Image: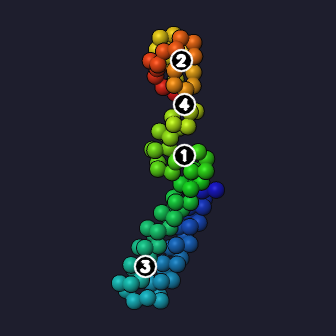
């Protein structure tokens, strides 16, 4: 589970590792390695979180997941002619293809 607590633990862990690297490596390399860790850790966490979101039903392309819902057929429409709510291509009540997405 990706929580704020997890993030803090990872942040503290990466801080500890980067401090250790400062001691082991000479100045420019230690600082560089520490920066890499600080950048890489949140990215890794975000990637894990994103892959979990993909399992939930998204397409994994951020905003693309929303558009993917429409293609999946789970998006509802409202008929512009008779205001009947339906799924799919055309209104089952009056057969009109005039519709808008219902959120
Ligand atoms: Zn209709």
Indicate which disc residue 58 carries. 1
Question: Quick one: label 3 or label 1, which is nearer the N terminus?
Answer: 3
Residue furthest to the right in view is 1
The structure residue drawn at horizontal position 59% and vertical position 45%, both measured from the top left corner, is 57
Choose mark 1 or mark 2, whichever is in front.
2
Disc 1: CA contacts within 10 A as few (<14), some (14-19) or many (>=20) = some
Q: CA distance from mark 4 to mark 3?
A: 47 Å
Q: Residue at x 47, y 11 (%)?
A: 81
Instruction: Point out the tag, 1 or 4, that comes first from the N-terminus.
Output: 1
- Is residue 21 shown above or below 5? below
Q: Is residue 42 left or right of residue 1?
A: left
Separation of marks 1 and 2 at Cα, in angstroms: 27 Å
Q: Quadrant of residue 88?
A: top right
Specify which label sits upstream in the sequence, 2 or 4: 4
Q: Nearer the viewer, residue 49 or 96?
A: 96
Q: Which residue is mark 4?
A: 75
Residue wearing tag 3:
33
Q: Which residue is mark 2?
A: 91
Q: Are marks 1 and 4 in contact (CB under 8 Å)?
A: no
Indicate the colouring scheme: rainbow
Do residues under tags 4 and 3 come within 8 Å of each other at their CB atoms? no
State how far apart marks 2 and 4 are (Cα). 14 Å
In this orientation, does residue 43 appear? yes
Callout 2: helix, strand or loop? loop
The first of marks 1 and 2 along the sequence is 1
Residue 98, placed above or below residue 5: above
Picture mark count: 4
Q: For the residue carrying disc 2, how many other residues have a C-alpha within 10 Å: few (<14), some (14-19), or many (20+)? A: many
Q: Secondary structure at mark 1?
A: loop
Any atom of ligand 1 within 8 Å of the CB at mark 2?
Answer: yes
Rendering coords of residue 36 (x, y %): 43, 73
């Amino acid at each position: 589970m990706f929580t704020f607590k997890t993030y803090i633990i990872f942040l503290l862990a990466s801080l500890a590792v980067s401090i250790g690297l400062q001691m082991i490596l000479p100045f420019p390399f230690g600082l560089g390695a520490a920066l890499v860790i600080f950048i890489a850790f949140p990215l890794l966490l975000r990637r894990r979180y994103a892959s979990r979101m993909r399992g939930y039903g998204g397409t994994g392309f951020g905003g693309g997941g929303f558009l993917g819902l429409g293609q999946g057929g789970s998006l509802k429409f409202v008929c512009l002619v008779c205001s009947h709510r339906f799924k799919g291509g055309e209104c089952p009540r009056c057969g009109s293809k005039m519709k808008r997405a219902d959120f």
